[in-house]
Amino acid sequence: MLDFACENPRVLRTDVVVDRDGVLLADLACHHATGRGRAAEQLRHAIVFVRRGCFVRSADGLESVLDPAVAYCMNPGEEERYDHPRPDGDDCTWLLLDSDLVASLAGGDPALPAQPIPTSGEIDLRHRLLLAAARRGTNPHELVERAIVLASRLLSQAEPRRVQAGWPATARARRAAADSVREALTASLDRSLPELARDVAVSPHHLSRIFHSVTGTTISRYRRRLRARRALERLAAGDRDLARLAFELGFADQSHLCRVLRVETGQMPSALRRALAQPAPEGGSSKSSHGISEPVG
């Protein structure tokens, strides 16, 4: 649920594109007339990236001019007001986070910085790519992981010591955390990043970094890889109904199954199904009878 000082849909348009696992991502377009806004109480933690326009936020005695070169944070209980010096409106990306998730990102303290945070070109591009990926219907687990990493990178600019708190001290501990995640995903591919982080007593953003450093890939991509392996096993067992297979294995639809298998293997399910259902050709040929390359030796 989003709460804003202006609820007129002709003035403020809100489009929620992700809402799960303590993360809500929304696209906001404001067309407020030039002038002073009205005060309202903020109810949730949020990080806001300005994509277009310029406006002034007043919160708890701090007045900040906000434009596309900065991001700003909000904390529950803040009395805030938005004033608009220009008539052409503004567009923002809102990233709302549950209190427990904020605490894990900020060294146990569930409070976000009061001052605006300058955004590097890399961070600004990350947030725009995240919004674009959400609009394309990218897997929600991947979106949540990317959102948490984005929030961590931004907060690291403002308060690096807080964000670094809780990083496992030894390579052995990091390896153990990554191995535990791999075991958990093998048992259930639907475990979210925050759930996995609670299991291994590591913050979600640290776990994402640890897993990548140990395995060379993200948790969401590793999950996709395991899902593809299950699909290959089912195809080899003779499954023919790709729509049913996609549903049972947790793909968004048959097209999603085809795209993932194409990325993972370079082949479409129809070709894989024909090739895997047949015995391997004799004589060590480097090509199968169905045109799929095979290793020799």
Image (cartoon, helix red, strand yellow):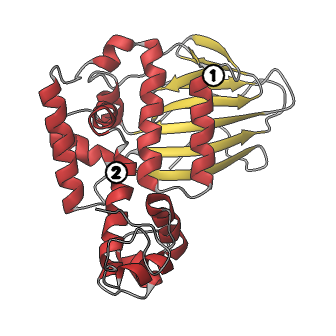
Q: Position of residue 120 (x, y in %)?
A: 59, 18
Whether residue 68 is visible, yes or no, is yes
The location of residue 251, given as percent across then percent down, is 43, 69
The amino acid type found where label 2 is placed reads: Tyr
| Residue 274, position as x, y percentages in the image | 43, 84
Q: In the image, what residue occupies the spot 34% across and 32% down?
A: 205
Instruction: Left or right? Give the position of 18 relative to 35.
Output: left
Which of these two is toward me, 182 or 79?
182
Secondary structure at badge 1 equals helix
250 or 32, which is in the foreground? 250
Q: Is residue 157 above or below residue 82?
A: above
Displayed quadrant of residue 240: bottom left
Query: Which type of secondary structure does the marked residue at label 2 adopt?
Result: helix
> In the rendered view, would you say 65 is above or below 34?
above
Residue occupied by mark 2: 222
Q: Is residue 196 toward the left or the right of residue 11 in the image?
A: left
Relative side of 78 to 229, left or right: right
Whether the residues at callouts 2 and 1 have beta carbons within 8 Å, the answer is no
Question: Of the residues under marks 2 and 1, which one precedes in the sequence?
Answer: 1
Q: Looking at the picture, how far across and down is residue 112, in whole percent?
A: 42, 22
Mark 2 closeness class: few <14, some 14–19, many ≥20 residues within 10 Å: some
Cα distance between the residues tagged 2 and 1: 28 Å
| Residue 125 versus residue 28 in the image, above or below | above
Instruction: Return the residue at label 1.
Output: 121
How dense is the environment of label 1, judged by Cα within 10 Å: few (below 14), some, or many (20 and up)?
few
